[in-house]
Image: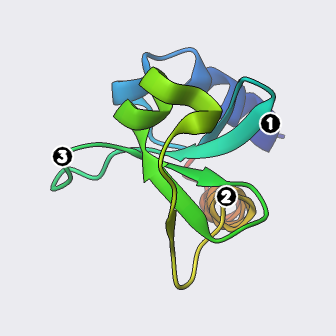
């Protein structure tokens, strides 16, 4: 049986701009969940885990916990991880990860 955690771990072995699944990053004692960059976006976004706020990944890399965060109407970092895990679980169930 394929392990979801192993799939996430393998994705984290790739450089950030090549990843397809969200991942946690910690800087200056603050942890965010980084959303992989959609093809149409200029930059990735880093979401606070339990608060609906985000910053650009470039700002996160440069300033860590001092980055400028903006409110988001619907998503926090925990939501990103939950949705990605559900998506991978569905793909496993459908036989896409053999």
Point out residue 80 in the picture as x, y percentages from the top left corner: 63, 61
Q: Is 76 in front, or is 4?
A: 76
Position of 69 compared to 24: left or right? left
Disc 1 target residue:
5
Q: Is 69 in front, or is 41?
A: 69
Compared to 29, does 45 lie above or below? below
Position of 17 compared to 29: left or right? left
Compared to 60, does 36 lie above or below? below
Point out residue 8 in the picture as x, y percentages from the top left corner: 67, 35
| First reached walking from the N terminus: tag 2 or tag 3 | 3
Disc 2 target residue:
77
Q: Specify few, some or many for label 1: CA neighbours under 10 Å numbering under 14, 14-19, or 20 or more.
A: few
Q: Report the mark closest to the observer, 1 or 2.
A: 2
CB-based contact (under 8 Å), mark 3 and mark 1: no
CB-based contact (under 8 Å), mark 2 and mark 3: no
Q: Specify few, some or many for label 3: CA neighbours under 10 Å numbering under 14, 14-19, or 20 or more.
A: few
Residue at x 58%, y 65% (from the top left corner):
53
Residue at x 43%, y 16% (from the top left corner):
15
Q: Is 50 in front, or is 1?
A: 50
| First reached walking from the N terminus: tag 1 or tag 2 | 1
Q: Is 52 in front, or is 96?
A: 52
Residue at x 64%, y 46% (from the top left corner):
33
| Numbered disc 2: secondary structure | helix
Q: CA distance from mark 3 to mark 1?
A: 28 Å
Image quadrant in which you'd find residue 85: bottom right
For residue 3, say whether it is visible. Answer: no
Q: Which mark is residue 42?
A: 3
Q: CA distance from mark 1 to mark 2?
A: 17 Å
| Numbered disc 1: secondary structure | helix
Dividing the image into 4 quarters, which one contains the N terminus? top right
| Numbered disc 3: secondary structure | loop
| First reached walking from the N terminus: tag 3 or tag 1 | 1
């Amino acid at each position: 049986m394929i392990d979801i955690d192993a799939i996430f771990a393998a994705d984290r072995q790739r450089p950030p701009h090549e990843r397809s699944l969200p991942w946690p990053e910690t800087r200056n004692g603050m942890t965010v969940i980084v959303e992989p960059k959609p093809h149409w976006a200029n930059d990735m976004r880093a979401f606070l885990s339990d608060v609906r706020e985000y910053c650009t990944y470039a700002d996160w890399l440069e300033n860590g916990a001092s980055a400028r965060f903006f409110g988001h109407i619907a998503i926090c970092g925990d939501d990103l991880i939950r949705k990605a895990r559900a998506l991978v679980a569905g793909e496993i169930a459908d036989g896409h990860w053999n």
